[in-house]
């Protein structure tokens, strides 16, 4: 990679970075009346940070559908509880839009899992991990890329919590919003550096 930027970051280096969380507006989208305003905001964006969360499985052969789809705009982060059909349909509509870039890490599995809930043909998807790989980086997770390109670390504490809960905890909401926001920030940084 050019301009002297390191290609790797150690766990110690990541842990030494300051923690940042998304501090803007977060809207949990589950009720039918919340869906249209959220989708309208998302569809007017040029770039949306995107991620999903799934209830963890601890036994062999056990798996669960996605519980949450997070989408970060310049103004807010929307957390769609995709067990609700209206919320899942709105996420599918956004993912199928060719006008809005959806940026995330490891999106192939997220999209495959979401398609089991609602059919769609995704367009304008940018996998930041794949972009990083093309430019010679070996570590392509959100946490490592955030450390390398944004200079802070995002907390990972609630990754394995129960995302299928009706009422998410404040920690879950902060974690989920931060991941989607970090993906949007990474896309903007990658664009500024000419990597996309």
Image (cartoon, rainbow, N blue to C red):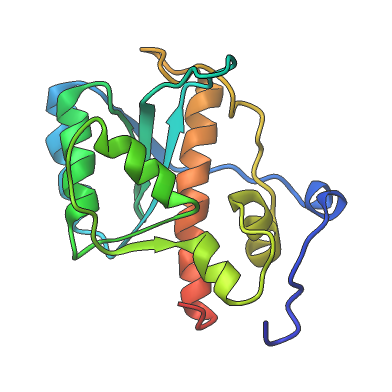
Front in this rendered view, residue 3 or 110: 110
Across and down, in percent, residue 64 comes to 41, 21
Pick the residue in front: 142 or 30. Answer: 142
For residue 193, above or below residue 104: below
Q: Is residue 112 visible?
A: yes
Q: Position of residue 14 (x, y in %)?
A: 78, 52
Residue 126 percent across, percent down from the top left: 39, 63
| Lateral position of residue 179 relative to residue 3, left or right | left
Indicate the quadrant where residue 5 lies: bottom right
- Residue 186 visible in the current orientation: no
- Tell me the residue at 22%/32% (across/down): 88
Left or right: 85 as drawn, with respect to 63:
left
Give residue 159's position: percent from left, percent from top: 58, 29
Q: Is residue 9 above or below residue 107?
A: below
Closest to the observer, 142 or 178: 142
- Which corner quadrant holds the N terminus? bottom right
Q: Which one is nearer the viewer's eye here, 71 or 22?
A: 71
Quick check: 72 left or right of 183? left
Q: Residue at x 21, y 22 (%)?
A: 84
Q: Please report the residue visible at 20 percent of the width from the left and 43 percent of the height from the top.
A: 92
- Residue at the far right in the pictured view: 12
Where, quadrant-wise, is the C terminus in this rendering? bottom left
Q: Residue furthest front?
A: 61
Q: Number of marks in the image? A: 0
* Left or right: 160, with 124 as reference point: right
């Amino acid at each position: 990679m050019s301009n002297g930027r390191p290609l790797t970051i150690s766990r110690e280096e990541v842990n030494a970075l300051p923690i940042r969380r998304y501090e803007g507006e977060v809207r949990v989208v589950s009720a039918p009346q919340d869906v249209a305003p959220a989708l309208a905001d998302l569809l007017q964006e040029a770039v949306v940070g995107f991620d999903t969360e799934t209830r963890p499985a601890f036994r062999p052969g056990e798996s669960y559908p996605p519980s949450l789809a997070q989408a970060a705009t310049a103004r807010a982060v929307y957390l769609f509880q995709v067990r609700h059909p209206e919320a899942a349909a709105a996420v599918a509509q956004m993912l199928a839009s060719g006008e809005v870039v959806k940026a995330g890490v490891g999106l192939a599995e997220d999209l495959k899992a979401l398609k089991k809930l609602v059919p769609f043909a995704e367009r304008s998807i940018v996998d930041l991990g794949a972009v990083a790989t093309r430019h010679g980086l070996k570590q392509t997770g959100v946490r490592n890329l955030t450390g390398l390109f944004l200079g802070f670390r995002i907390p990972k504490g609630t990754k394995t919590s129960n995302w299928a809960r009706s009422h998410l905890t404040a920690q879950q909401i902060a974690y989920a919003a931060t991941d989607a926001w970090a993906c949007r920030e990474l896309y903007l940084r990658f664009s500024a550096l000419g990597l996309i």
